[in-house]
Amino acid sequence: MYEYLIGKVTGITPAYIVLENQGIGYQIQCGNPYYYVGKETQETCIYVHQVIREDAHQLFGFKTVEEKKLFLRLISVSGIGPKSGLAIMANDDHLGLIQAIESKDGAYLTKFPGVGKKTAQQLILDLQGKLGDIIEEGLPAKQPQLFDGTHHLEEALAALKALGYSEKEVKKVEKELQQTICTTTDEYLRVALKMIMKK
């Protein structure tokens, strides 16, 4: 099992990044792949969790060890698979997530894709009082703009769909995002996720 990988990001898509390490390109699924825009020229450490199935070997990546720990706790809950866990992790407000679980706020939890009332209750039941050791790392620094601004919004919307948000949910925030001035895809995606959680 891998703990982390260090290498250079050589590809970024709405659902995953490619991290090259000693001539091998690892496909790593991330909640927000666009966080890595601008980091292609430097060595990057990504904490990973490997999921092995009959038809696939998948790597899920995280910026910090605390994020990885939170993801592992989430997928230990019945009804939360790696894809749902990653969609929950995409929202950078991890402290808000922990507070929602601690305060039994099922309405907040059902805003995530793939989380219904039953799964939200299971999250609360299984994780309440068990997340205090995970320290919120805060929002990562904004990354420099790398490509033409007209593509940022479209890429952010594609990333939302890759996380499992429905076309209807994406359309709801698209109009608001069009009126928002952001300089990177990463920034658009962060704003979009905050909008979804407030609706």
Image (tube, rainbow, N blue to C red):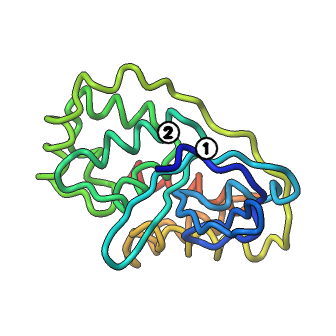
Percent across and percent down for residue 27 are 59, 68
- Answer left or right for 181 relative to 63: right
Instruction: Check disc 1: other Cα within 10 Å, few if <14, some if 14-19, many if 20+.
Output: some
- Answer left or right for 177 relative to 119: right
Q: Amino acid at mark 1?
A: Lys
Percent across and percent down for residue 86 are 43, 55
Q: Amino acid at mark 2?
A: Glu
- Answer left or right for 125 relative to 110: left
Circle 1 — which element? loop
Percent across and percent down for residue 91 are 49, 48
Q: Is residue 140 shown above or below 52?
A: above
- Answer left or right for 145 relative to 7: right
Q: Nearer the viewer, residue 9 or 104?
A: 9
Is label 2 in contact with label 1 (beta carbons under 8 Å)? yes
Q: Is residue 30 shown above or below 143?
A: below
Residue displayed at 46% across by 71% down: 170
Q: Is residue 104 shown above or below 84?
A: above
Q: Nearer the viewer, residue 196 or 135?
A: 135
Q: Identify residue for label 2.
A: 67
Q: Residue 50 appears in which quarter of the rendering? A: bottom left
Residue displayed at 58% across by 29% down: 137
* Mark 2–mark 1 distance (CA, rounded to whole Å): 7 Å
Residue displayed at 53% across by 63% down: 29
Residue 45: mark: none
**Figure quadrant of the C terminus:** bottom left
Q: Identify residue for label 1.
A: 63
Instruction: Check disc 2: other Cα within 10 Å, few if <14, some if 14-19, many if 20+.
Output: many
Circle 2 — which element? helix
